Image (cartoon, rainbow, N blue to C red):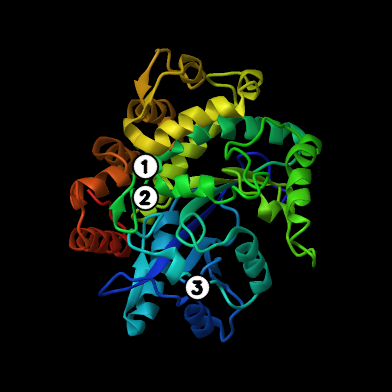
Amino acid sequence: MTTSHDIFSVFGIELEYMIVNRDTLEILPLSEVLFKEKTGDFNGRYEAGEITWTNELTAHVIELKNTAPKTSFKGLHAAFHANIKDLNKMLEPHNAMLLPTSAHPLMDPKTQTVLWRHENREIYELYDQVFNCKQHGWSNEQSMHINLPFTNDAEFERLHAAVRMVLPIIPALAASSPILEGEITPYRDARLWAYVNQNKNLPAIAGRIIPEPVFNKLNYTQQIFNPIQAAIKPFDKQKIMDKHRLNARGAIARFDRGSIEIRVTDIQECPKADIAIAELIIAVIKGLANEKSCSINRQKSWHTDDLRVIMTQTKYAAEQAIITDSNYLHCLGLHVTKVSAQDLWQHLLDNHKSKISKESQATLSSILNYGSLSSRILEKVGKIPTSQSIYYTYSDLADCLAANILYI
């Protein structure tokens, strides 16, 4: 994403997947093998036409993203799926495959983490030194990143204000991580719980996850970037850390690229579901930025802590969370005193259908009808999951990814 794109004129999507053993689902650090086979080197990047593959922090994760900014969602989930099929074919000789969802249900990050060992390894090693990446939220986390552009402070103001308003309810739609280390957690979005707690030793890095109410580059630099740089300075002797990359809030401003990157969305069971969710999230953000239900000034007035209360509710209960902040609901165009997060998203879908493809409308209707992927996973594994029930459930999810179909 470059600085030449006006607000909402284009977008970017990034999807992350785990590499696992086909028979046991144990994670396998094989991403370097994939790049070596494709490029003859370990440079961690391969352009496959419309989709580009890149490495991540850990060697068992690979990221897929659109190579160039997109103006339309048409055909995008199919393009991602085509690359998933190519990757699974390459992994077959290694008895491996890609696995969806935002957290591996059995991984022990303390003993199974292998960091990327090639290009930029010094950055990943420094991350590990400072934050200890051998924990959930670092080495066991996969998400969808949504990138939206802006060209100047006026566009950034509108975009950042709207994004902050939508972040708290994204887990209600997209949660896919109810299980860690074989146990059902208290959270439907355990990845987000771990993500919130991953930077406690340097709180300036992630802040309160919901970004601070700052709406121009100067204030963002003073209130967010400067504290980040001050926090990392004692550790970054070689000055290799970039302030944009260090920023771990749920939505980060990339002034170097002219975009805001949304990072709180759990990965789903297939690209069809991810793209549908992205379409709806972008449509809602665009509606807010255009002041369809709430003025920009009213959006800007929201305190981070008030928004974080709502995110905490959805992090725990996903679509079953009951939102009782009537002022928040009014800003989203729903004039009631309380509502389930599921019904709130149904309201938002109904209000933005004209901006969403028919195919994604159908996918979203299924998600809202059957519940978040976390809820569907919990229904399948049982109240007291066994290693066998987890294995069968996540094997089915791998099949959904391979076929690009919903888990319902």
Res. 114 mark:
3
- Do callouts 2 and 3 mark residues in contact (Cβ within 8 Å)? no
Residue at 56 percent across and 43 percent down: it is: 250
Vertical side of 34 occupied by 75: above or below: above
Bin the neighbour count of mark 2 within 10 Å (Cα to Cα): few under 14, some 14-19, many 20 and up. many
Vertical side of 159 occupied by 4: above or below: below
Q: Is residue 145 visible?
A: yes
Residue mark closest to the camera, 1 vs 2: 1
Q: For mark 1, what is the residue?
A: 187
Bin the neighbour count of mark 3 within 10 Å (Cα to Cα): few under 14, some 14-19, many 20 and up. some
Bin the neighbour count of mark 1 within 10 Å (Cα to Cα): few under 14, some 14-19, many 20 and up. many
- Do callouts 1 and 3 mark residues in contact (Cβ within 8 Å)? no
- The three-letter amino acid code for the residue at tag 1 is Tyr
> Separation of disc 1 and disc 3 at Cα?
26 Å
Chain-order first, disc 2 or disc 3 = 3
What x and y, as percent, mark residue 248? 61, 49
Q: Secondary structure at mark 2?
A: loop
> Separation of disc 2 and disc 3 at Cα?
21 Å
Chain-order first, disc 1 or disc 3 = 3
What x and y, as percent, mark residue 382? 18, 49
Chain-order first, disc 1 or disc 2 = 2
Residue mark closest to the camera, 2 vs 3: 3
- The three-letter amino acid code for the residue at tag 3 is Val
- Do callouts 1 and 2 mark residues in contact (Cβ within 8 Å)? yes
Q: Secondary structure at mark 1?
A: loop
Residue at 54 percent across and 51 percent down: it is: 198
Res. 19 mark:
none
Q: For mark 2, what is the residue?
A: 177
Q: Is residue 172 visible?
A: no
Q: Nearer the viewer, residue 384 or 347?
A: 384
